[in-house]
Image (tube, rainbow, N blue to C red):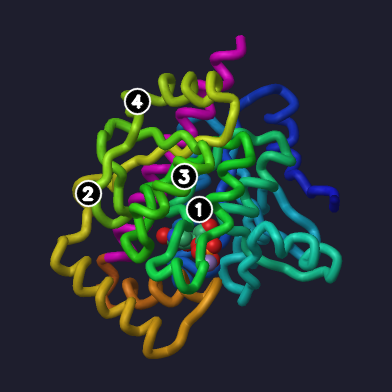
Amino acid sequence: MTTLHIAEEVAVALAENRPVVALESTILSHGLPAPRNLTVADRLERVVREAGAVPATIAVLDGVPHIGLTRAELERVCSEQLLKLSLRDLGAACALGRSGATTVASTTALAHQAGIRVFGTGGLGGVHRGAHETWDVSADLDVVATTPVLVVSSGVKSILDMGATLEVLETRSVPVVGYRTDRFPAFYRRESEFGVPWRVEDAKQAAAVFAAGGRGMLLVNPIPAAFEMDVELHDRLLAEGLRKLVDQNVRGKDVSPVLLEHFHTASGGVSLDANEELVVSNVQVAAEVAVALCGEQH
Ligand code: PSU
Ligand code: MN
């Protein structure tokens, strides 16, 4: 496997067993429009620091997986047209010297390779609607099932088949734990019709559950109430977005970006604010869990 470029600050923190939080780059390059993405990227790193952990934004630059980016590298990720790299794409991107943003799947794998145990993101990929015909199931599920990293997300978007996604997570033995909630969150909405098998009340409990389980885990944190999207607006955007996919024959890895783009343009920015605030909240929780995890070992 290619060697990683680990930023000095991240390497030192890991060596001293201090808390580090992994952050993904696909959300920046394919999930949010420029220049908003850079504002969000900066804010996420700040939130991690303020909680007492070190941020490690992950991306592949010129064929080298970077664990922790400089401001200039962050600017590159937020302005260049980057490839979307899932785990299977890493070998090709590295061998061919390409640059790309990492998804939950590839970020989780690279974080683990670097020795990082906690990762904060927005939404996890999952089973798409109509997957019984298209077989479109995100590699995110497989990687979370096989990699001992705790991922904090706001559940999955309602653009996915949530019930099927939860079934796959159960089959693949991924613990799904609600952060101060009994309901599985639906990204823009705090609750879905689905419950979660376990609930924790604070970061310390979440860290204990992860440490005891010894495997990957999904900690789900609902969007802050003030930014939850109005249900009618949400349902209208979703119906329109799904129709757009069919009309434009969108397939594979373009599905999520096209739907996100539709939400952002058609909601007049409401979904952008929602997206930013939920990621910030997840990253905040991730940092607290990372801090608690390091405390546990002393
Ligand atoms: N869901 C979101 N925002 C995102 C993504 C998913 O609400 O930005 C991105 C993440 O990087 C996730 C990826 O890992 O899309 C999943 O893509 P796919 O469905 O092609 O596996
Ligand atoms: Mn897919």
In the picture, measured across the screen, residue 281 lies left or right of residue 170, that is left
Q: Gap in Å between the C-alphas at discs 1 and 2?
A: 34 Å
Of the image marks 1 and 4, the number of the one nearer the N terminus: 1
Q: Residue at x 55, y 21 (%)?
A: 211
Would you say the beta carbon of the disc 1 residue lies within 8 angstroms of ligand 1?
no
Q: Gap in Å between the C-alphas at discs 3 and 4?
A: 18 Å
Give the vertical position of 132 relative to 56 (above or below): below
Question: Three-letter amino acid code at disc 2?
Answer: Glu
Q: Residue at x 62, y 46 (%)?
A: 108
Q: Which residue is mark 3?
A: 169
Residue 168: percent from left, percent from top: 47, 48
Task: Say few, some or many: other residues with alpha carbon within 10 Å of mark 3 (under 14 / 14 to 19 / 20 or more).
Answer: many
Q: What range of the chain is rendered magenta?
A: 271-298
User: Please, what secondary structure does the residue beneath circle 3 have?
Assistant: helix
Q: Residue at x 80, y 48 (%)?
A: 4
Which label belongs to residue 200?
Answer: 4
Q: Which residue is mark 1?
A: 42
Q: Relative to the observer, which residue lies in front, 34 or 169?
A: 169
Q: Nearer the viewer, mark 3 or mark 4?
A: 3
Of the image marks 3 and 1, the number of the one nearer the N terminus: 1
Residue 287: percent from left, percent from top: 49, 34
Q: Gap in Å between the C-alphas at discs 1 and 4?
A: 29 Å
Q: Which residue is mark 2?
A: 193
